[in-house]
Image: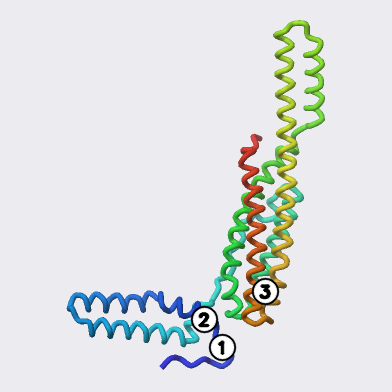
Amino acid sequence: MAEQPKKGIERPRMGPVVARASTNPVNLGVAAGSAVLAVGLMSWPLGVLGALAYGAMVAYDSMNPSFWKKVHEVKALPAPKLPPPEQVRDASTRAAVAQIVAARAELGRVMAETPADVMSQLSTTLSFLRELEAYATRLVVRAEDIAAHLAVVNVDALRADASRLATRAQSASDPAARAGFEQAREAREDELRTIAELDTAKDRIDANLQRLVAVLSGLPTKVVHMRALDAQAMDQVSGDMNAELEAVAGELKTSEEVMKSLGEVTK
């Protein structure tokens, strides 16, 4: 007989349990072995017995609280791949990383206290979190790269040099010299445009990282809220959470593509 539910163990939603039991390697092995023997011996009764044995094993797992625990057990959140905040040189990026790490730690604490039936609703959320972390990690690297370059660029000096070259071009009587000064001025102007694009890209990264901070910081409260809801309301909250995380992932992906279009900053 199946193991009876122990006191204090709630029956979870059975859909994921039955699905896992149906694909349990042991159960599938019994079904496959019976099928092979039935075909080899040309015995349909043996095939029927195999099918019945497979069904019985699926039913046993589906009614076994120990198996429920395995199905709904959610592993601890993976350690953040983000660099430690103290290793981030840019101040605004460092603050964002520190906030993300703190938010993840709080979310992990809340999830550790969350019942299995609620956690079963969060598998998609956890997948989005891993995706967001990957985007955020790459954006942090690029933010550091941009910030380090901008820190050593003297924009005022570049503007002054562009103005000086324009004056020299206007005053030059030799056409070749004039053309040379114009080309040098255009190179300086192009550098200034690229610097402005990098500055804008850095602002976009900062904004998206702060959006991620805000969303992650709100997740623990939403998970606690889900504990008090019925299954239908829980589905709704879970769907809203996933939609929000998907939107943030889209924004981070867009920022990453902008960084790729600019190319790596040459230090």
State left or right for residue 24 relative to residue 126. Answer: left
Label 1 vs label 3: CA separation?
A: 20 Å
Please give the residue where the numbered disc 2 appears in the rendered image.
69
> Upstream in the sequence, badge 3 or badge 2?
2
Question: Tag 3's secondary structure?
Answer: helix
The answer to the question of whether label 2 and label 1 lie on touching residues, with beta carbons closer than 8 A, is yes
Please give the residue where the numbered disc 1 appears in the rendered image.
9
Is 257 rendered above or below residue 98?
above
Q: Residues within 10 Å of mark 3 (few under 14, many from 20)?
A: many
Comparing 39 with 191, the one in front is 39
Label 3 vs label 2: CA separation?
A: 19 Å
Tag on residue 223? Answer: 3
Q: Amino acid at mark 2?
A: Lys
Question: Tag 1's secondary structure?
Answer: loop
State left or right for residue 251 relative to residue 64. Answer: right
Residue at point 63%, 47% (across, down): 256
Q: Where's residue 217, x and y in %?
A: 72, 65
Comparing 181 with 18, the one in front is 18
Give the mark toward the camera: 3 or 2: 3
